[in-house]
Every structure is written in C-alpha cells, then in structure tokens.
Amino acid sequence: MSREQLAPYLAEALGTFALVFAGPGAIAVDAASGGAVSGVGIGLSFGLIVMAMIFALGHISGCHINPAITLAFAARRRIGPAAALGYIAAQLAGAALAGFAIVAIVGDHADAGASLPRLGGTDAALVSEAVLTFFLALVVFSVATDARAQGALAAIAVGGYVAMAATGWGPVANASMNPARSFGPAVASGAWHAHWVYWLGPIAGALLGALAFEVIRPGSPPGPPAPERS
C-alpha cells in the first residue's frame, strides 16, 4: 500500500486518538483533580478537538473518527465496504491507544472517561445515544455531502454540535455518539458495563440521521422563482 493509500487510515487513527485523549481524557483529569476541568470544560474539550481535527484532517480522510458515521456513509454508498472496514479498524486502534495513554498519565480515574449509563440507567442511555447521534449525522451529512452548505464552516458546525451534546447530555450517559470513543477507555480501564448501548444507539441513530437528510434534501439548488405566464 502506497503512502497516499495509507494516509486516510492513518488520519482516522490519529484523529480518533486525539478525540479520545482530549474528551474522555478531560473526564479522567477532572476526576483526578477534584473537578478542575468542570462539566463545561469537558464539553468544550470534546467540541474543540472535533473542530480542530476536521480542519486538520478533513481533506485527507473526511475525518469521520467515528464508526457510526463511517457505517452511515457506507450505507448511503459514499464509501466502499473495504474502505469502511479499514476506517473502523483504524478508529478503534487509535481509540484504544488513547485510552491506554490516559491511564498511563492519570490512572484509571473515572474509568479513563469510559461511557457508562448514569441518569435513568440503560434505557435512558440507549435512547439518548440514538437521538444525539441522529442529529450528529444529520449535521455531518448536511455539511459534508451537500455542495450548497457552507463547507468551510463544517468543522464549526460539527464541533459546535458535539460540544452542545457533551455539555448538556453528558451527565445522562456521557453523550458518546461514537463507538470508538467508548471502546478506547473501556479497553484501557475494563469498564464494559452496558457497552453494547454505545454501539447500538449511535449506529442506529447515525443510519436514521443519514436517511433523514436524504429524505429532506432538495433535489436541486434553490433559485429565483420562475416568471409568471399570462
């Protein structure tokens, strides 16, 4: 495989490493420091790292950094099956390495930022993950697949949404929206309780979000009204 062929997979691994190190890492640092980061700081850590990685890597791989988003792209035939599997393998590898890095630096505080059901238990976690990822995919597909969107602002749109979700809904079930984000800390800390929620919820939400965008997407760019005929 040439360097050009390898680059997208390496970009996905690096981007997902950065996401897990910054987001779940912020959760672990907050627990280790007695709340020095705060819930708002954790939410901003997630949103800002996603924004930065899209700016840095979006032109190389699309910066999915999320198996649920990659599967949604594959379902809509915007990425081939082999490439999708390679992306997901790279994402999981990057996430696992980041989980071990978190544990090596600050220990297993807060299970290295692992995703676990909290308010409302497993049912609330599953529903919240599906709903949050639905709108994440809607935003991603809108800014990434429609030429009429403000493409230069895609990173801000996606990062802003992630920051909102992590800040407002993090206390329910960590607002993962991303199987890799949940997988990395689980591997490093051994916190596997209800881990299936963080695959089923995000994947279902992403597939439905991508489908919803295709349904509401106009068939042609909006233009001036046609002249009236007498």
Image (spheres, helix red, strand yellow):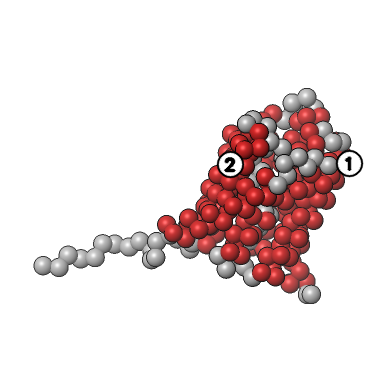
Return the x and y of residue 45 as percentages of the image width and height: 68, 40
Q: Please rate how many residues cluster around mark 2, counting C-alpha atoms within 10 Å: few if below 14, some from 14 to 19, many from 20.
A: some
Return the x and y of residue 141 as percentages of the image width and height: 53, 57
Q: Residue furthest right?
A: 104
Residue sitting at 68 percent across and 46 percent down? Answer: 198
Residue sitting at 68 percent across and 32 percent down? Answer: 118
Q: Which residue is mark 1?
A: 104
Q: Residue furthest bottom?
A: 2
Labelled pair 2, 1 in contact (Cβ < 8 Å): no
Return the x and y of residue 130 as percentages of the image width and height: 58, 46
- Residue in front for this viewpoint, 229 or 115: 115
Mark 2 or mark 1, earlier in chain: 1
Q: Is residue 138 left or right of residue 64?
A: left
Q: Residue furthest top?
A: 34
Q: Please rate how many residues cluster around mark 1, counting C-alpha atoms within 10 Å: few if below 14, some from 14 to 19, many from 20.
A: few
Q: Is residue 11 left or right of residue 201?
A: right
Residue sitting at 69 percent across and 68 percent down? Answer: 83
Looking at the image, can residue 230 be seen? Answer: yes
Residue sitting at 63 percent across and 60 percent down? Answer: 71
How far apart are the two marked residues, 2 and 1, measured between alpha carbons?
A: 33 Å
Q: Residue furthest left?
A: 230
Quarter location, residue 160: top right
Q: Which residue is mark 2?
A: 127
Label 2: element kind: helix
Label 1: element kind: helix
Quarter location, residue 89: bottom right
Identified by mark 1, the residue type is: Ala
